[in-house]
Amino acid sequence: QQQQQLRELQLLNPYVAQIECRLENSNLWEKFDNLGTEMIVTRAGRRIFPTFQVRLSGLDPDASFMLMLDFAPCDDKRYRYSFHTSSWIVAERPARAGQGARAPGQPRQGAHWMKQVVSFDKLKLTNYNMDRNGHIILNSMHRYQPRFHVVHLPDKQLPAGRGGGGLQPPASGDDLNGHSDSIRTFVFPETKFYAVTAYQNQRITQLKIASNPFAKGFRDCDTDDCTAQLLNQFSPPARLNGRGPPSTPGSFLPAVSPGDFTTAAARRRGLKPAADCLSLA
């Protein structure tokens, strides 16, 4: 297996062959994986927890890269939770889980992506097939594996105004397949999860309450009393007349750095922005 990986690396573009990626909160992901991670999907969209966060190294500081995340079905089976055995089992009538289109993120230089943790804090999952808010559409009671992709973009592929010739970055599956030697994909098995509309395993609910900093208000109350509130706590009201391109099951979501969105939000609340007090190693 190691020899096969070496052969695959030799076929890659030198810009991506040396890239290394580390899952930041791997210990927390492993705790959930041992129980069978569940992620809530709603019509309005629900953020995932644990948050998918990675740290990159080995990128060319001056080259341009685009970071992408998708959710590949682990199989074509539909699952259900057996409360009798406290485990997930395959349902009688399996259904196909779709994969969908790929929407690229904003290209940035390697130095930008390496200076701090890359976090998909804004990522939201939905089960609404007609969603137009850019959320990731998944089918409930199916199992998915997140896949993180680093795409090297030659100067000729950069959008006009960013030092390139005006060509857009790859935006479809066909475009990405045509540049397979410039893509490095990282898969962390401990991040796979079941998409659900309500938590099935009570131990998952308890671990989310204990681990999620936004669930502080639930820690002092009885778990059974708080479960129903917890399921609806983290989803803001859906936007009316939402704009944006339609999403499809398994869509990509662009990566964001914490500094891209925390500064303005913090100032609106009268807090000191995280970017103002952030020191990078």
Image (spheres, grey):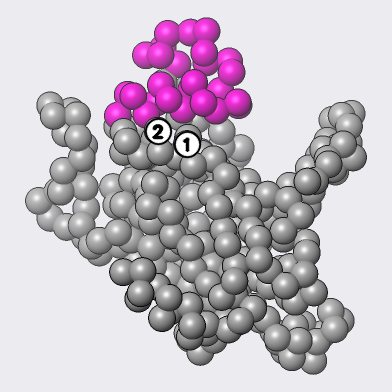
The circle drawn on residue 27 is 1
Residue under label 2: 31
Residue sitting at 65 percent across and 60 percent down? Answer: 57
**Would you place residue 215 above or below residue 80 in this image?**
above
Q: Amino acid at mark 2?
A: Lys
Q: Position of residue 250 (x, y in %)?
A: 43, 63
| Mark 1 and mark 2 residues within 8 Å of each other at the beta carbon | yes
Q: Position of residue 78 (x, y in %)?
A: 21, 53
Q: Which residues are magenta?
A: 201-226
Q: Secondary structure at mark 2?
A: helix
Distance (Cα) linking label 1 and label 2 = 6 Å
**Would you place residue 111 above or below residue 208 in this image?**
below
Count of numbered labels shown in the rendering:
2
**Magenta segment includes 205:** yes
The circle drawn on residue 53 is none
Quadrant of res 8: bottom left
